[in-house]
Image (cartoon, helix red, strand yellow):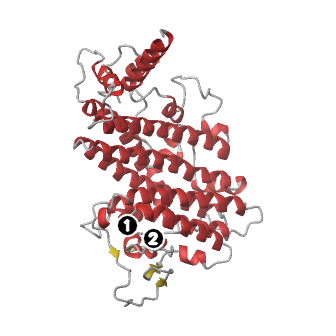
Amino acid sequence: MVTQDVTPWSVGLSEGTKKYIQNPPPALHTQDNSAVEAYEKYLRLPELSKLWKFKDFPLWNNESIIKPALQGLEITFRHISVALSDPRPYANHREWRRRLESLASNQIEIIAAICEEEMSGGGAPIAELITSEGMLSRQPSSEVWKLPGTSAVVSRTSEASLLPRLAAWDKSEDVATKILYQIESQMVRCPFTLGLGEPNLAGKPVLEYDLVVQPLELHALKKSPLESKTRRNRENETVFAVHQILESWVYTAQQLLTRARERIDGKQWEKAASDCWLMERIWKLLGEVEDLHLLMDPDDFLRLKSQLAINASSGSDVFCFRSTALLEITAMSRDLRHKVPWILGVEVDPNGGPRVQDAAMELFHNRRRGEGSSAGKIDLLQAIQAVETAVKKFYFGYRQLIMAVMGSLEAGGNRALFVPSDSLDLLAQMFLEPPYYPSLDAAKAFLGDHWHNQHNNK
């Protein structure tokens, strides 16, 4: 894992960072192929991935990013239905309601940010629903709105999504209403709206939601192959939905990181920075998805853990490491550091000089840094460091989650949590490893010293 952004730049770095150069971070791979296969079979990932990857609309460049994100949102609607219909007297319906409302809202916010780039639809399958010359094509899924002093507009409601059904159910009506208004407000800067029943008072074109998301095919995958083995355990539905949501967004992240790297190679600094800021938010979203495990009943979940043979005691046995896609986006997020010399317009000094560090300091301190490409480069460098922070927060949070849900022995026994050591488990090393960008860190440290000395010399 030694990279171009790490090896040559030992000048001015801390001893901890120099030690890191000699002892690279743990490799991101899992050795237990049978555990990976069981994980994917349990979540029906092969079938789910076909829905993510199939290109239904060749002219829509962002289909591979937006489609799995919308499918993750649709699975969240299913999870709301499961959580609010839970008959167990000890289920915390009130907190589930709050958590899932928040989760849906954050997903919609990210989806809207992705859709903002869709110039005039960008090849997306959309339907024009504004009335023309007083005539309106009547459809059972459409509803006409007429505001004083305005022309009539139409709001379309998906026929296959679960959200309209949640809006018609007394237990979830308030949740669905909040989600619909979130869609209305978050999609305000997008060229189209989603068509899930939101008011659409702006009269914008509507995404062909059912054609894109394919809710019927998606919800056909709602039962795991181990249903008979785990019957009478309601937490199976929770674990199943949570990880299907997680994997949908992990696939979205893969596509987004691929696009970010292409944009960096094409020197599209501002657009690449936008993708990296979105990646930071997706990593935070993944942490929020995992935190849903905190609401599960301890006895029911630990019984399910035994039934599914979930073991988080060491290395590749950690449940999150069974997701090969999660490990891939972790590696892709780390590997953004390879792009730093290219962004700064310098080559790595083969003699180990601080060439990249000096270029970063010059960029940060340039009096004209708001002009031309400089602003975009600074924003991009800030964004990739934000991605690093989000990655480490995710793995730190995941380790704490294991301790809270399964007990501290599952998180590595009695070994020290915060003391860097070769004996630490792989999960702890993930968030304890030194910075991905030592040259940027050193540049900011020296820049801070510069301004400190300037202030003291006045």
Residue 211 seen anywhere in this rendered image of the structure? yes
Sequence-first tag of 2 and 1: 1
Q: Are marks 2 and 1 in contact (CB under 8 Å)?
A: yes
Q: Few, some or many C-alpha atoms within 10 Å of disc 1 (few <14, some 14-19, many ≥20)?
A: some
For the point 62% across and 68% down, the residue is 175
Looking at the picture, tell me which residue is in the foreground, 260 or 330.
Answer: 260
Which part of the image, by quadrant, shows the N terminus?
A: top left
Q: x, y percentage for residue 192?
A: 38, 68
Q: Is residue 333 left or right of residue 285?
A: left
Disc 2 to disc 1, how far (Cα)?
8 Å
Which labelled disc corresponds to residue 51?
1
Residue furthest front as drawn: 149
Q: x, y percentage for residue 156?
A: 45, 79
Looking at the picture, tell me which residue is in the foreground, 348 or 133.
Answer: 133
Under circle 1, the secondary element is helix
Q: Where does label 2 land, which residue?
A: 218
Q: Amino acid at mark 2?
A: Leu
